[in-house]
Image (cartoon, helix red, strand yellow):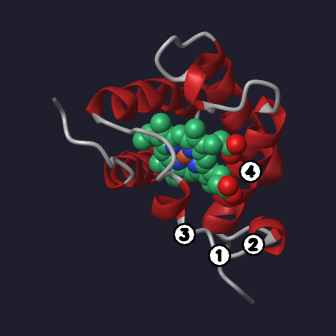
Amino acid sequence: EEPQSFYDAVGGEVAFRHLVHRFYEGVVSDPLLRPLYPEDDLAGAEDRLRLFLIQYWGGPNAYSAQRGHPRLRIRHNPFVIGSAERDAWLKHMHDAVVSLELPDDLEKRLWDYLVYAAHSMVNAPDA
Ligand code: HEM
């Protein structure tokens, strides 16, 4: 029998749906981040991030079935991401992570990954 995936441990699709929806609720009202995202397809952006995170944490591979290899740094090249954008992204993601009310060890694993990933997405030096 396979060990339980992190995806299952945190509550499967329902948890990731909640996480990413909550994150985009923050993005919508963020004057720094909102302009980076598609004006009329935030639902599409929400789908893409949710499917990526589900796949990353051991759930179904729908992200790659639809989008191919993630290549996330390359996909973020069109957007100027400095430390301010990174920190705004992480602020909304932190609110979203906390709202899941996970056990501490699971919350820490999820949050540590998101911090690491957000730092690795920075592609613009500070002025
Ligand atoms: C896409 C911004 C960090 C995962 C996007 C998009 C923007 C964006 C503007 C396009 C939205 C769309 O899909 O139409 C940012 C900013 C970040 C950040 C400002 C700050 C550091 C991250 C991190 C991850 C991530 C840390 C992963 C843990 C994704 C994914 C997509 C995406 C999976 C969709 C890629 C695709 O299939 O086209 N991001 N992002 N992003 N982002 Fe980020």
Where residue 88 appears, as percent x and y from the top left, is: 41, 24
**Frontmost residue, 38 versus 111:** 38
Q: Earlier in the sequence, mark 4 or mark 3?
A: 4
Residue kind at label 1, given as amino acid type: His
- Residue 64 is labelled as 2
Q: Quadrant of the C terminus?
A: top left
Mark 1 → mark 3, Cα distance in angstroms: 6 Å
Badge 3 vs badge 2, beta-carbon distance below 8 Å: no
Amino acid at pointer 3: Arg
Q: Is residue 101 above or below residue 48?
A: above
Residue 102 visible in the picture? no
Image coordinates of residue 110 in percent, x first then y, are 49, 50
The image's mark for residue 71 is 3
Q: Is the C-beta of the residue carrying label 4 under 8 Å from the nearest atom of ligand 1?
A: yes
Real-space Cα distance between discs 4 and 3? 13 Å
In-front residue for pair 56/70: 70
Say whether disc 1 or disc 4 marks the residue closer to the N-terminus: 4
Classify residue 127 as left or right of residue 87.
left
Q: Residue 85 in the image: x percent, y percent? A: 39, 29
Give the quarter of the figure containing the N terminus: bottom right
Q: Secondary structure at mark 1?
A: loop
Q: Residue furthest bottom?
A: 1
Q: Residues within 10 Å of mark 2 (few under 14, many from 20)?
A: some
Instruction: Find out if the beta carbon at label 2 lies less than 8 Å from the nearest ligand 1 atom.
Output: no
Q: Which mark is residue 69?
A: 1
Name which residue lies at 74% across and 34% down: 18
Q: Is residue 65 left or right of residue 124?
A: right
Q: Which residue is mark 4?
A: 48
Q: Are marks 4 and 3 in contact (CB under 8 Å)?
A: no
Task: Tell me the distance, in whole angstroms, between the alpha carbons under discs 3 and 2.
Answer: 10 Å
Measure how far apart labels 1 and 4 are at the Cα level.
Answer: 13 Å
